[in-house]
Amino acid sequence: MKLAYIATYPPRECGIGTFTNNLFKSMLNGNVNQNEENEGFVVALNDNELEYKYPDEVKATIRQDYQEDYLKAVKYINLSGADVCILQHEFGIFGGQSGVYILPLLHRLEIPLVVTLHTILKAPSYNEKAILKEICKMANKVVVMSIKAIEFLTTIYDVPKEKIALIEHGVPDIHFNPEKSKKEFKLENKKVLLTFGFIGRSKGIETVIKALPDVVKKYPELIYIVLGKTHPNVLRHSGEEYRISLLRLVKNLHLEKHVLFLNEFIDEQNLFKYLYACDIYITPYLNEAQITSGTLSYAVGVGAAVLSTPYWHAAELLAKGRGRLFHFNDSDELANTLSQLFDNPEQLKKLKNKAGEYGKKITWPKTGEKYVALAGKILEEEHLEVDKKESELDLLILPPFSLTHINRLTDDTGIIQHAKFGIPNLKEGYCLDDNSRALLMVLMAYRQMKDKRALELSPIYLSYIHYLQNPDGTFRNFLSFSRNFLDEKGSEDSFGRTIWALGYLLGNAPNDAYYQTGRLIFFNAAPNFEKLTSIRGIANTMIGISYYLKSNPSDDSMTERLRNFANVLMKHYKENQSDGWTWFESLLAYDNGILPLALLHSAEILNDEIITQTAIDSMNFLTEHTLKDNYLSIIGNEKWYKKEGERSVFAQQPIDAMAMVLMYHQAFHVTNDKEYLNKLYTSFLWFLGENDLRMSLYDFETKGCCDGFESYGVNRNQGAESSLAYLISHLTVLQAYEEFHRSDLKLV
């Protein structure tokens, strides 16, 4: 039997990586049928941009936040000859919102799937619940490590009980002499307390420290060892703040000689020496929400005397005299329990014996045998049907998302508006339109991918917008490369696109400074809203207002402005519609999808059926004339398409494709109709060659997008407008893909 594993893996410092390493070794050595040999390989998850020197069994890697890596990995697994795939699931190790990036991989998996769940939340968010339910639906078997986990899966996540297998956390079969271990660490003649694992506030270590003064008075030879590094996520966001607070607490209680912090991630051999050297092991977690604890399993497995707060796994594992429980945050109770056990060595010995007896049943060789038997049973079952979702959205053909060309076009003033081929054309300077689009794009990229470069670029574009704003709240548009203003007041289109970007910022600001700056510019511009007359300027402004209202729904004044704008578009629609022509103008011109898109956004806010129907009718009209033969054919701006006239094919421009992608995405939001996601993806493929010329506008070398189609072929210049249109569309496809996999819809 050949096995494929997907998880974190050593040398990455991660508890699940250690678990997977032990599972891998125990399954390869734990075949129930000794006449057959198991083999396997690992697909390892990398943490952000970090790379590791993996052992030979790691045959592929996945960068956490790169969705294309997941699709490459599943292709490798499907072609590898593997019989069963074993996935370790934990929120936080997979990319996308709530780890949604793992779903496309699992949907494409062509072999049976076993999923081991390390975290099962009692009160999950909508996304967490939807994603875990989907994973369990695709799995042939779901492995959990506690009875409580089975209860949660069946009652909260609707997983059939027969699909769940209980296999307890394995414990390495490592043995040391307690006296020799104490001597090696120079702990002889000491009473040793131990806590190990990644350090974070939820671990409750301060509860133990506060309990020590009373115990130390009676047993001055006592020492408490806290073994483990600060959790990487904690370190990333808060640094060593928690560890420093513990050190300060130790000093205030004059316990410097009795508390030892070992800030390291040690190998299992040394870890088990510490476990054998300790007299009492403590897990003082602060709340019950811990369905599995590998550290607790290890402590019980070696026959340690264990004290713990009653989190879910501890309450179950330490039952029947295998350990003792104390209340959350109750240092006094812990102090009394410690004194009582040290006063009564026979009670302490009894706890160790009970734990040791149980530990013999959960060694990794036995756990590995159970997993092998489970995988074998799955392969033996006939007529196995795994519910897999199929989608026309295929990210395998998407180029990796890249800001390379945007970096090339951007300096400390803003984004250069034009390019000669892939080289910035400094002679043309900057414009407000493109810097507003650029702000929208990098905000989307940071929101979806936590792209650090996107975050670094965003203040450049925001400061350009601020610089171009006039005292009356309007905006200039053009700035020369030498930073001279080239106009007094920009177009209404540029005004509207700026409000769009600012509205999005107010709903998705990465920090308060960006939010406050965006809010200032937005409301300085607001008095000019009613002066707009261009329907595209109005439409872009409506989108920005809609984004603002999503995070500020109680702003009645802005809601009325949105309603008034919607009525203006509706008036244009009524004046121009006729039999066979359901549109806002007497021609289809440029950026056409923006008009239905604006109504779709306002319909979501205003909940107006007439607005919704008008949006859908106009969208269907645009679809009829641009989406044919399973590809997008954009109205060319050479002559456009006048009512009762001939439709122009050239020149087609990327902003029109972007508008179509965004329009169908918002249509899906409003109607929940899966067919709009198919149309969204078809529209996006225009950039990659599914178009009238069957030529890709995306340049795989420069990572930019060409400026459009002319009658002679592709315009190879790669200005900001076209490249930003491509990237916004790309991000929208990725977002739609996530949303699809969070839903219960099925694309056909």
Image (tube, rainbow, N blue to C red):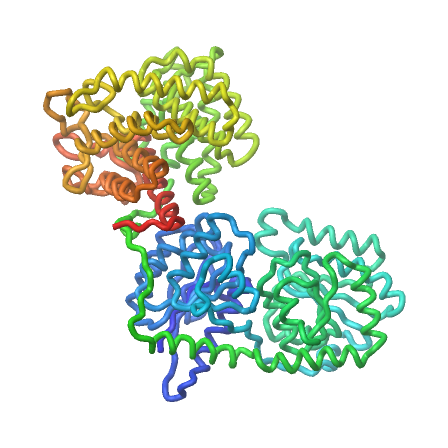
Number of numbered discs visible in the structure rendering: 0
Residue furthest right in the image: 217
Q: Quadrant of residue 664?
A: top left
Question: For the point 47% across and 76% down, which residue is it?
Answer: 25
Question: For the point 79% across and 59% down, which residue is it?
Answer: 331
The front one of 582 and 436 is: 582
Q: Measured from the top left, where is residue 646 in percent x and y?
A: 10, 24
Q: Measured from the top left, where is residue 387 in percent x and y?
A: 33, 61
Above-or-below relation of 216 to 679 = below
Q: Measured from the top left, where is residue 409 in percent x and y?
A: 36, 32
The front one of 199 and 644 is: 644
The front one of 218 and 152 is: 152
Is residue 4 rendered to the left or right of residue 262?
A: left
Above-or-below relation of 350 to 93 = below
Question: For the point 69% across and 80% down, which residue is it?
Answer: 354
The front one of 297 and 147 is: 147
Q: Measured from the top left, where is residue 637 in percent x and y?
A: 19, 24
